[in-house]
Image (cartoon, grey):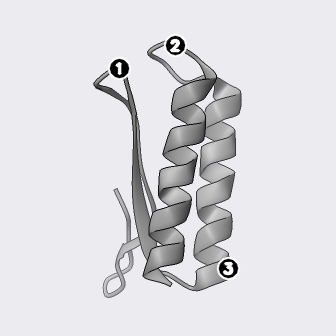
Amino acid sequence: MRRLISSTAVVLVASVATRSAAQQLTPAERSSIDSSAVAILDATGAPSASIAIVRKGQIVYEQGYGNGRIAPNTPAS
């Protein structure tokens, strides 16, 4: 399962990084990343994931998904 999540995260980063030379993500890119991450968590049952998108050496998007802590239930960041 970890390989699937890691491989998918790399694919997401690579596909977003090659779409545009701009330093910021478009709303459509953010939406695509967010929906893909949530779908992967649902499909694998993983409790959480963190993603960082890097363009030209700059982090342009960071997001946590799922639960960062199960008890007490705390959203990932």
Expressed as whole percent of the image width and height from the top left, the position of residue 7 reads 50, 64
Dot placed on the residue nearer the N-terminal end, 3 or 1: 3
User: Marks 3/2: CA distance?
Assistant: 31 Å
Is disc 1 in contact with disc 2, using a CB cutoff of under 8 Å?
Answer: yes
Q: CA distance from mark 1 to mark 2?
A: 8 Å
Tell me which label, 1 or 2, sits earlier in the chain.
2
User: Which element is circle 1 on?
Assistant: loop
Question: Of residues 3 and 42, which is closer to you in this image?
Answer: 3
- The circle drawn on residue 43 is 3
The reply to whether residue 60 is visible in this rendering is yes
Residue 73 position (above or below residue 5): below
Instruction: Report which residue position mark 1 lands on.
Output: 56
State the residue at coordinates (60%, 82%): 44
Q: Is residue 43 left or right of residue 56?
A: right
Residue 77 shown left or right of residue 13 in the figure: left
Q: Residues within 10 Å of mark 1 (few under 14, many from 20)?
A: few
Eye-nearest disc, 3 or 2: 2
Kind of residue at badge 2: Ala
Q: Which residue is identified by label 2?
A: 21
